[in-house]
């Protein structure tokens, strides 16, 4: 009986080690930052990607917290902290746009998800959060927006008649004011024709 119990215990230990190794592999190789926080809201673990996103060296100690900000630069601390909210409300926060100020003052846009770590019916004992640096995407969207505004201004203010039509059907999708003045048509008379 003792031999069976020891054999079962060894199998459980092997399974536990394998599960831990799988979890480490998963978190270290994922392309997003993974951070676990304890019940106090302090980081307890960061994968390589999270350290890279937050400019924390691989051997540097974990910080006391992660200074996140809203779009206006106001700190997300106390009850405004997404980590504190996930702990307190026992609810996941999905797709929150936050900002992180680097030591040099440059800001990074972060896409954050936070989920409480808890056993059914008990207090949350921590939070797992994922971070994605979306700074380049935000900059690309801003450049696209600026380009669209410039095109719109050029289109509307051009002294030349301009007609925009669909390539395949040839249907008119928009005309500028110069076209309306020269042609004498009203906009709704030509759109879709």
Image (cartoon, rainbow, N blue to C red):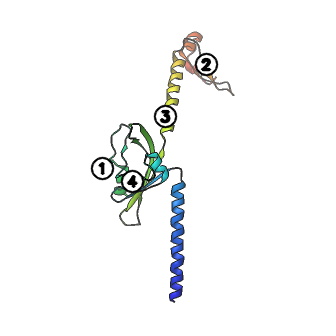
In the rendered image, residue 169, in percent from the top left (x then y), is placed at: 68, 27
Which of pointers 3 and 2 lies earlier in the amino acid sequence? 3
In the rendered image, residue 139, in percent from the top left (x then y), is placed at: 49, 34
Image-quadrant location for residue 89: bottom left
Is 45 in front, or is 37?
45
Q: CA distance from mark 2 to mark 4?
A: 59 Å
The answer to whether mark 2 and mark 1 are in CB contact below 8 A is no
Task: Give the structural element (helix, strand or loop) at label 2.
Answer: strand
10 Å crowding of disc 4: few (<14), some (14-19), many (20+) = some
Label drawn at residue 139: 3
Q: Is residue 155 above or below residue 92?
A: above
Which of pointers 4 and 1 lies earlier in the amino acid sequence? 4
Which of pointers 4 and 3 lies earlier in the amino acid sequence? 4
Q: CA distance from mark 2 to mark 1?
A: 55 Å
- Nearer to us of marks 3 and 2 is 3
Q: Is residue 172 above or below residue 53?
A: above
Label drawn at residue 78: 1
Q: CA distance from mark 4 to mark 1?
A: 19 Å
In the rendered image, residue 56, in percent from the top left (x then y), is placed at: 43, 48
- Nearer to us of marks 2 and 4 is 4
Asked whether the viewer can see residue 181, the reply is yes
Q: Which residue is mark 2?
A: 163
At a point 33% along the width and 58% down the height, the residue shown is 40
Task: Give the structural element (helix, strand or loop) at label 3.
Answer: helix
Q: Which residue is mark 4?
A: 62
Which of pointers 2 and 4 lies earlier in the amino acid sequence? 4
Q: In the visual, does 18 lie left or right of 119?
A: right
């Amino acid at each position: 009986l003792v031999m069976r119990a020891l054999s079962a215990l060894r199998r459980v230990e092997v399974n536990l080690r394998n599960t831990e190794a799988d979890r480490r592999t998963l978190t270290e190789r994922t392309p997003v930052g993974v951070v676990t926080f304890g019940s106090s809201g302090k980081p307890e673990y960061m994968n390589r990607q999270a350290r890279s996103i937050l400019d924390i060296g691989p051997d540097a100690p974990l910080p006391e917290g992660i200074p996140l900000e809203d779009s206006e630069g106001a700190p997300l601390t106390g009850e405004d902290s997404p980590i504190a909210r996930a702990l307190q409300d026992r609810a996941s926060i999905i797709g929150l746009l936050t900002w992180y100020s680097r030591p040099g003052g440059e800001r990074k846009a972060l896409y954050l998800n936070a989920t409480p770590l808890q056993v059914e019916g008990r207090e949350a004992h921590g939070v797992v959060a994922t971070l994605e640096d979306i700074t380049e995407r935000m900059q690309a969207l801003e450049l696209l927006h600026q380009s669209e505004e410039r095109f719109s201004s050029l289109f509307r203010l051009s002294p030349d008649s301009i007609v925009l039509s669909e390539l395949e059907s040839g249907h008119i999708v928009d005309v500028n004011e110069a076209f309306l003045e020269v042609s004498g048509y009203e906009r709704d008379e030509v759109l879709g024709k």
